[in-house]
Amino acid sequence: MADAPDLSAQLGDLVDHHCHGILTGDLDRPAFEGLMNEAVRASPLGTTLFDSTLGWAIRRHCAPVLDLEPLAPVEEYLDRRAALGGAEASRRLMAASGVGTLLVDTGIPPDELTPMGELAGLAGGTAYEIVRLERLAEQVLTTGAGDFAGEVEERLRSAQAGGAVGAKSIAAYRVGLQLPASKPSTDELRRALAGVDASRVADRTVSGWLAHTALELGLPLQFHVGYGDSDLDLLDCDPLRLTAFLRATQERGVPVLLLHNWPYHRQAAYLAQVFDHVFMDLGLTIHNTGALSAGVLRETLELVPFAKLLFSSDAYGLAELYLLGAVLFRRSLSTVLGELVTAGDATAGDAAYVAGLVARENARRAYGL
């Protein structure tokens, strides 16, 4: 029986292909807990968000970065974070994550979130923009531009010229993932826009048009899938609902990337297997499942081609989520690949090769980095 391989060299430098800015200011406990996961707030009916695998993971893996013992009590952790100050705590946690390249969704308020350059500086890496399509549409609508389609296309081309490497659709939040297989016509788009609220685009025709347009322009396209906050209907977020859209767009050869995916990670793995242009990650699933994240990764690897799985943290607001996304991903992938090697089902070289693919090479290939 072979020994489990040491994959630290292959997993040291990560490409985080989907993430967000953070808040570097000082945070009290309610503000901190409000950023921990997708809950709207910490409810007194559910005690505290620290009573979860995510809460334990923060105490286990983030505490030592702030000079505390692993699993330090919650109050001790928050007091130490406050003593260091939000900026210093964030700097330490981001630097410790080992994320070298960040693909940042810039479409989420508030304005206090770190801009891409500052975020990259905290991580000691490089950042690229991912354009959020519905946010872009809302910006165009509020300007009152007469030619919506032309203005959106022009802004997407301008973003590409400025270094943006992909686009993201949040159709899952707005209308679900049953998007049209064919691109809506100009007349269909115009009729749909007549009933759209410019402050919150929530129309299947508009989201479908945006998604098709991004792919036509050659922009790798991310879709939020599955797990999110109470603003979405999880039942409508099964990626299998994208099947007709994926079948229709496969010939373009432009990557479609399914984000997060829990509890539909097995469905996403299937789609990545049967469609050439589909990729997937486990995103915020990893840090929210904490020490148990290897189980979700193991289920995903049942079917997903190794060249189709990417790393992302989907970190937002808290630098802790960048660290946890990276640490738990490394640990989980090492665990699952190590099991295969020790069982004689893969070589140490196989495991090292796959680790490098998932950690960075798949993202570099999909986005042309």
Image: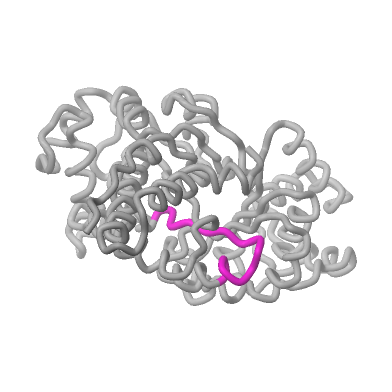
The image shows residue 294 at horizontal and vertical percentages of: 30, 59
The vertical placement of 63 against 53, above or below, is above
The image shows residue 280 at horizontal and vertical percentages of: 52, 59
Residue, x 88% and y 49% (percent of image)? 146
The vertical placement of 366 against 194, above or below, is above
- Asked if residue 85 lies left or right of residue 351, the reply is left
Q: Which of the pair 190/342 is nearer the observer?
A: 342
Query: Is residue 277 rendered magenta in the image?
Result: yes
The vertical placement of 285 against 314, above or below, is below
Image: magenta residue range: 271-284
- Please indicate, yes or no, whether residue 31 appears anywhere in the rendered image: no
Farthest front residue in view: 1
Q: Which of the pair 17/270 is nearer the observer?
A: 270
Can you say which quadrant of the picture contains the N terminus? bottom left
- Please indicate, yes or no, whether residue 8 appears anywhere in the rendered image: yes
Query: Is residue 337 rendered magenta in the image?
Result: no
The image shows residue 357 at horizontal and vertical percentages of: 49, 48
The image shows residue 245 at horizontal and vertical percentages of: 70, 70
The vertical placement of 150 against 95, above or below, is below
Residue, x 87% and y 49% (percent of image)? 150
- Asked if residue 110 lies left or right of residue 214, the reply is left
Residue, x 74% and y 63% (percent of image)? 206
